[in-house]
């Protein structure tokens, strides 16, 4: 009998890759979202708000597995505690969480919230699996697009290991359909880049030129990033798709045929 899986955040970047994979595996999929959507194509959409604690009991009713992808700049710890309580009461047998590499090391408020969400899952009384992943190529692209609008682009003093969201989705589906495994090895991209490398790669891919201005990140967070505490250099599973390959797919096809940006 197919498992019924509730996916929170199923309409986001990661969720859009996860849902088809779960359906292909024969799972019954329910998506929890703040915004209403008509059910169809094998997916049952339910509406609620994890941070406010609304609609969660109905969403987890009859669910075997919860794949918790929903997240934001704040409130992830509150959302996780609300979800955990409802899932435990509903008899959910496996809770899977996506988190971020460095959640236990980098002193930023949103990462402390991620770590607290991890702890809520680990202490839930439900069998669990947590995967920490690096920042997605999609996020790096969004940052580069916004920063490239400036006449001079700030390049913060930090390194990243961007990973393809499709590879993260495939790993999460594997973990979701498998046995609970606790905290599994991190998933990072195949290469480490400075912000200047990432921004320069984006500019080359879209045929533009902009000067880069190195920027030193201040405070404890800056020291943490310079020390590479947001990276996973030992023991991580590495994805295969590089930043350059991602850019060729997403940006290179839209590159002007002649010349560079004149602005």
Image: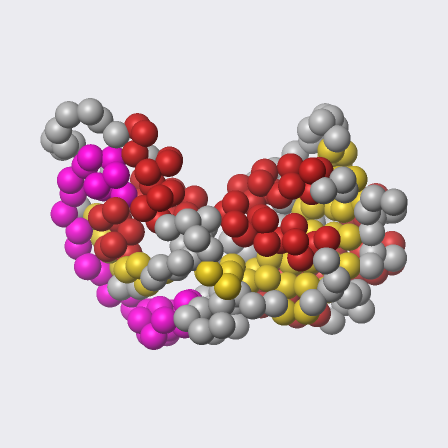
Q: Residue visible at 31% across and 59% down?
A: 193
Report the front residue among 160 and 222: 160
- Report if residue 13 is visible in the image: yes
Residue 18 place in picture, x, y as percent? 62, 43
Question: Which of these two is toward me, 157 or 199?
Answer: 199
Q: Residue at x 80, y 69 (%)?
A: 125
Colouring chosen for the image of the structure: secondary structure
Membership of 212 in magenta stretch: yes
Q: Which residues are magenta?
A: 202-231
Q: Viewed as shown, does residue 14 lie left or right of 106?
A: right
Q: Is residue 85 left or right of residue 50?
A: right
Residue 225 drawn at (x, y percent): 35, 69
Asked if one can make out residue 106 in the rendered structure from this viewpoint, the answer is no
Picture residue at 83% right of the left edge, 56% below the top: 92
> Is 195 displayed left or right of 214 in the figure?
right
Q: Against 69, is 103 above or below?
A: below
Percent across and percent down for residue 19 are 65, 39
Question: Above or below — where is 190 with respect to 30?
Answer: below
Q: Quadrant of residue 120?
A: bottom right
Up/down of 12 relative to 96, above or below: above
Quadrant where the C terminus sits is top left
The answer to whether residue 200 is magenta is: no
Q: Quadrant of the N terminus?
A: top right
């Amino acid at each position: 009998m197919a498992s019924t899986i509730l996916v929170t955040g199923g309409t986001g970047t990661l969720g859009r890759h996860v849902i088809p994979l779960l359906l292909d595996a024969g799972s019954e999929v329910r998506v929890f979202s703040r915004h209403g959507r008509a059910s169809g194509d094998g997916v049952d959409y339910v509406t609620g708000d994890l941070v406010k604690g609304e609609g969660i009991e109905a969403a987890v009713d009859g669910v075997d597995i919860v794949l918790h992808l929903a997240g934001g700049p704040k409130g992830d710890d509150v959302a996780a505690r609300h979800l955990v309580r409802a899932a435990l009461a509903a008899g959910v047998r496996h809770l899977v969480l996506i988190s971020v590499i460095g959640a236990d090391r980098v002193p930023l408020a949103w990462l402390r919230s991620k770590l607290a969400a991890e702890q809520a899952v680990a202490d839930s009384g439900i069998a669990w699996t947590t995967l920490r992943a690096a920042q997605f190529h999609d996020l790096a692209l969004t940052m580069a697009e916004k920063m490239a609008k400036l006449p001079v682009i700030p390049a913060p003093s930090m390194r990243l290991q961007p990973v393809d969201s499709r590879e993260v989705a495939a790993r999460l589906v594997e973990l979701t359909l498998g046995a609970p495994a606790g905290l599994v090895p991190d998933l990072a991209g195949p290469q480490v880049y400075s912000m200047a490398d990432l921004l320069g790669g984006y500019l080359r891919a879209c045929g533009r030129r902009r000067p880069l201005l190195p920027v030193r990140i201040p405070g404890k967070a800056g020291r943490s990033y310079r020390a590479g505490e947001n990276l996973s250099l030992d023991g991580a599973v590495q994805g295969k798709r590089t930043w350059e390959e991602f850019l060729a797919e997403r940006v290179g096809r839209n590159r002007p045929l002649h010349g560079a940006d004149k602005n």
